Amino acid sequence: MRALGRSGVLVSCVGFGTVKFGRDSGLKYPKGAEPVRLPSDAEAAGLLDAAEALGINLLDTAPAYGTSEERLGRLLKGRTHPWLIVTKAGEAWDGATSSFDFSKKAISASIERSRERLGAAQLGCVLIHSDGVAEKESGGFSGAIGALTGARSKGHVRLIGASIKSFEGAARALEWADVLMVEFGGAEPMEILSARAETRGVGIFAKKALASGHLDKLGADPIRSAMKRTLAIPGVCSVVVGTTNIGHLQENCEAAAQAADELARANDGKKSEKGA
């Protein structure tokens, strides 16, 4: 578990992404990969059981993930595991294309739909689901930020932030966000920004750390090396991975646990050297 910025929330160093619970098209996976098949309710419940057993407490969803929110609302009913559910607002998916609306009215309506779908009086975290364009414009998210801060003040949302695509967008979002979700991909500017976020007390979720399944791009022992590289970045609280395969989920968690242990031992060693 890692502290999520200065929010007072602890999150597992692996988060469980549920795009494949509700959307089976328009996903960027390797050529030749098996087509995405939405899991049955029994299979999805089994994945949640496995995630709980592995110590995961972070669930990632979004309206743009098809029926993911509605399914999670049903599947989580009656469970007592202390999930932090992260959803998003600003992007809609019609089964073929995405559309974006970052106005205050649209974001407020999206938050209310998510509360209803997930059966939650308070959403754990809501992120602006950026299109990569508005985030670079001064005032591009002004309406969305107003809606998010308003929902937080009413107690409808605990934490707010943005899922961002650019360094410029992330730098702007640091001014108001509790949490950012970013892709690193070896980009040094994003790592610099993550360190800045840590200083400001803004939590960081890492997305696409496993290159959306393109493991051939990650070198030898790709999962373990990707987890260690990502969890070593200052400010990173959790690596969000999506799968419908329990074995893959276990493998991801084992790799992350090993990486986190190695990093902790290295940090303890550095502290001992300083003390000496």
Image (cartoon, helix red, strand yellow):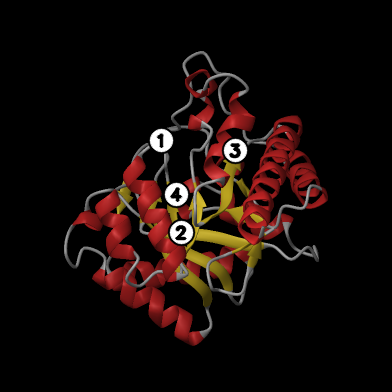
Question: Which label's residue is closer to the chain start, 3 or 1?
Answer: 1
Q: Are marks 2 and 4 in contact (CB under 8 Å)?
A: yes
Between circles 4 and 3, the one closer to the viewer is: 3
Residue 126, placed above or below residue 212: below
* Along the line of sight, the residue nearer the viewer: 52 or 262: 262
Q: Which residue corresponds to the image point at 75% horizontal and 36% vertical from the top-left?
A: 250
Task: Using the rendered image of the protein, determine whether residue 37 is visible from the camera's viewpoint.
Answer: no
Q: Position of residue 179 (x, y in %)?
A: 46, 64
Between circles 3 and 2, the one closer to the viewer is: 3
* Amino acid type, residue under disc 1 in the picture: Gly
Question: Which label's residue is closer to the chain start, 4 or 3?
Answer: 4
Q: Is residue 91 left or right of residue 111?
A: left
Q: Which mark is residue 64?
A: 4
* Amino acid type, residue under disc 4 in the picture: Ala
Q: Residue furthest top?
A: 32
What residue does disc 1 label? 186
Distance from label 4 to label 3 (Cα)? 26 Å
Q: Which residue corresponds to the image point at 51% horizontal and 37% vertical from the top-left?
A: 209
Quarter of the figure that contains the N terminus? bottom right
What residue does disc 3 label? 227
Image mark count: 4
Q: Which residue corresponds to the image point at 64% horizontal and 31% vertical from the top-left?
A: 224
* Amino acid type, residue under disc 3 in the picture: Met
Residue 223, placed above or below residue 123: above
Q: Which mark is residue 7?
A: none
Question: Which label's residue is closer to the chain start, 1 or 4?
Answer: 4
Between circles 1 and 4, the one closer to the viewer is: 1
Label 4 element class: helix
* Amino acid type, residue under disc 2 in the picture: Lys
Label 3 element class: helix
Distance from label 3 to label 2 (Cα)? 24 Å
